[in-house]
Image (cartoon, grey):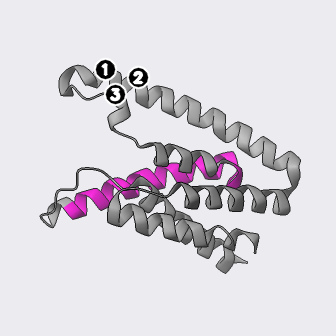
Amino acid sequence: MWSLVPLIPVSVLAVSDFRHRSVSVVWLAAFGVATIGCSLLQYGIGTTLWRTGFNLALLIVLSSLIFGWLLLRKKKTGLHPKDYVGAGDLVFVLLLTPFFDLRDYLFFLLVGAVGSLLWWSIVTRLGRRPATIPLVGTLGTFLILHVVVELARG
């Protein structure tokens, strides 16, 4: 039941990201307090620290691989890797680390990435070419769906 608490700030963050491609630091902080607090209340400090540590290690590995690929690609595009992901996106993904165990976090990130690309593809086909993908918006939407499905399961 604690997993419902982060839904308020994540909803505000998602709407803001879809509309303006920016997120509020205040709502990111509220989301952080909600996810960390709920994880501590639901799982205790030990499990929360383990989840955060393992998921942070996963993020470091994935980020290193993606960053390396983008550096190689920079020669063709002229874009720097920092041009691909915003600070709010990075903070949001970091704040999710205590919320999932390692397997579920990896699955969530993969589904969220595919969903983000699918969203971008659909919007592009409709004739609107968005400059960026609202990662917080799409991941936030998937987080809301995840919580609803988990609560429905019992």
Asked if residue 112 lies in the magenta stretch, the reply is yes
Find numbered disc 2 in the image and state the secondary structure of the residue it sits on: helix
Q: Magenta segment, which residues?
A: 98-123
Find numbered disc 1 in the image and state the secondary structure of the residue it sits on: helix
Find numbered disc 3 in the image and state the secondary structure of the residue it sits on: helix
Main SS, magenta residues = helix
> What type is the residue that disc 2 sits on?
Gly
Tags 3 and 1 touching, CB below 8 Å = yes
> What type is the residue that disc 1 sits on?
Leu
Q: Position of residue 37 (x, y in %)?
A: 77, 59
Residue drawn at the location 19% of the way across and 23% of the way down: 76
Q: State the separation of the CA atoms marked 1 and 2.
A: 6 Å
**Classed neighbour count for the residue bearing mark 1: other residues with Cα under 10 Å, few (<14), some (14–19), many (≥20):** few
Q: Position of residue 131 (x, y in %)?
A: 23, 50
> What type is the residue that disc 3 sits on?
Leu
Q: Position of residue 73 (x, y in %)?
A: 27, 25
Tags 2 and 3 touching, CB below 8 Å = yes
In this picture, is 59 found above or below 70?
A: below
Location of mark 1 (residue): 72
Location of mark 3 (residue): 70
In this picture, is 67 found above or below 29?
A: above
Residue drawn at the location 35% of the way across and 30% of the way down: 81
Is residue 118 rendered to the left or right of residue 76? right
Location of mark 2 (residue): 68
Q: State the separation of the CA atoms marked 3 and 1.
A: 5 Å
Tags 1 and 2 touching, CB below 8 Å = yes
Q: State the separation of the CA atoms marked 2 and 3.
A: 5 Å
**Classed neighbour count for the residue bearing mark 3: other residues with Cα under 10 Å, few (<14), some (14–19), many (≥20):** some
Residue 69 quadrant: top left
Is residue 87 rendered to the left or right of residue 117? right
Asked if residue 69 lies in the magenta stretch, the reply is no
Residue drawn at the location 64% of the way across and 61% of the way down: 30
